[in-house]
Amino acid sequence: MAIASIPLSLWQSTARAQAADTAPPPNASSIDVRASSAFGTYGDTDHVFVQTPSIAGSVANPTAGWSIDGQYLVDVVSAASVDIVSTASRRWEEVRQAGELNAAYKPGPFGVSAAGAVSSEPDYLSWTAGGALTQDLLDKNLTLLAAYYHTHDVAGRSGTPFSVFSHAINRDAFKAAATVVLGRATIASLMGDLVVENGDPSKPYRYIPLFAPGTYVPLGASIDLVTSLRVSARPLEQLPLSRERYAFTARLAHRFYRSTLRVDERLYADSWGLKASTTDARYLVDVARRVETGPHVRLHEQTSVNFWQRAYVLEPGFDYPALRTGDRELGPLLNATGGFLLRVAIGSDREPDAWALGFDLNATWTQFFDDLYVTHRFAAVGGITLEAQR
Amino acid sequence: MKFSSLVVFVCSLSGCAHVAVYERGALAHPSMTTGDLASPSEEHVREVHEGAMGGSFSAGGGCGCN
């Protein structure tokens, strides 16, 4: 099961197109070539482990205003989470492959970009295509962006052909953004997102325990306790067949003499009743000519969707709740993340940035406020990147 | 004319300054990009762990969440 829909990096490619205008004048007729290889790893206390090798590359001619970049990654997931164990399933492993390609052309104040992405795994196929328009105004002190992406997902069951069993999910994503130069060292971005989803995103493996009216099921109830309390009926998850998401993000970045402070705030609401706030801050310091490092903190809190229940009740007459989920990412939770990144230029004295090594490590504590099986989760994600450019 | 007025109005609200191209050395630093600085792995985790990720949520990829 995998990441579907619109990769963040697609949004970022449009953001990069905006940011390109703040770069210093390039060497005439120069072509920048960059390549990178990365390895990421994830593990958490719910016995989920992911290894993610990836490669990326880009070719750009800043003078002419065009660029092409792409990325390919493989996710190798190994899981024996409480959700899997609670359904008497065994540990499973799965491989996902994903690739994306972006192209941008911005010879002057007006620019266009296009992007496509594909993600594939045994029970899920997703593709995304779209593009963005940018317009510089006020001598490039204000840049406007409008973007649209369409995603088509096919969700199935592992081992069963899509022609026998599958759900189609379509998403239309609209974005509008304005980037404003607030001063010689300060820049701000305001972004609005609207995503309209249609289709059945319910997980075909997720069974929902039901309880008789009046049964008290405590927070974090164990698998054994849930098994002893629940009724025999255990239907599959059923989510609403459409969803509208709204988000507003403000980002502020300020460059000090040898450091940068970046702060983001994202407010989110959707038609399922979920509301969230995400605050993200990074402070990056040039501690030496070749070394950049700094801390990262992130706080995400969200309410539950409006059909969330810790313990769904099987009403008399054996009517299942029409909407039901066991996806704890749809419940009320708090994520607190802390981490750092380190980048070391390892090129020659003449071109120190020709080669660079990057390290990043983040640890996240999640508190689940109204869930079965678990009340918290600790996760760590880290990565190492080797970059080359000429 | 209306569009120009709108741009001026937005700019006056946001307080944007007029910074010439030759004054943008600090803005050109890679860390000043308007994009996210998260690594691909970190992005992936967010998409799975935050139910509020716009458009990037749905299938909970690689999450082991069944």
Image: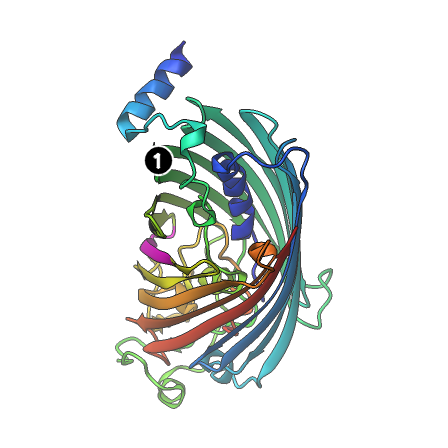
Q: Around disc 1, counting alpha carbons within 10 Å, would you say few (fewer than 14), some (14 to 19), or many (20 or more)? A: some
Farthest top residue in view: B1
The residue tagged 1 is: A184
Q: How is the structure coloured here? A: rainbow
Instruction: Decide whether residue A284 is among the magenta residues.
Output: yes
Instruction: Decide whether residue A318 is among the magenta residues.
Output: no
Q: What residue lies at 45% left-to-right and 27% top-to-bottom?
A: A140
For numbered disc 1, what is the local secondary structure? loop
Query: Circle 1 marks a residue in which chain?
Result: A
Task: Classify residue B37 as left or right of residue A349.
Answer: left
Point out residue A312 in the picture as x, y percentages from the top left corner. 36, 71
Q: Which residues are magenta?
A: A272-285
Badge 1 amino acid: Arg
Relative depth, front residue between A383 and A298: A383
Does the magenta stretch mainly form a helix, a strand or a loop?
Answer: strand
Point out residue B36 in the picture as x, y percentages from the top left corner. 45, 51
Relative depth, front residue between A139 and A330: A139
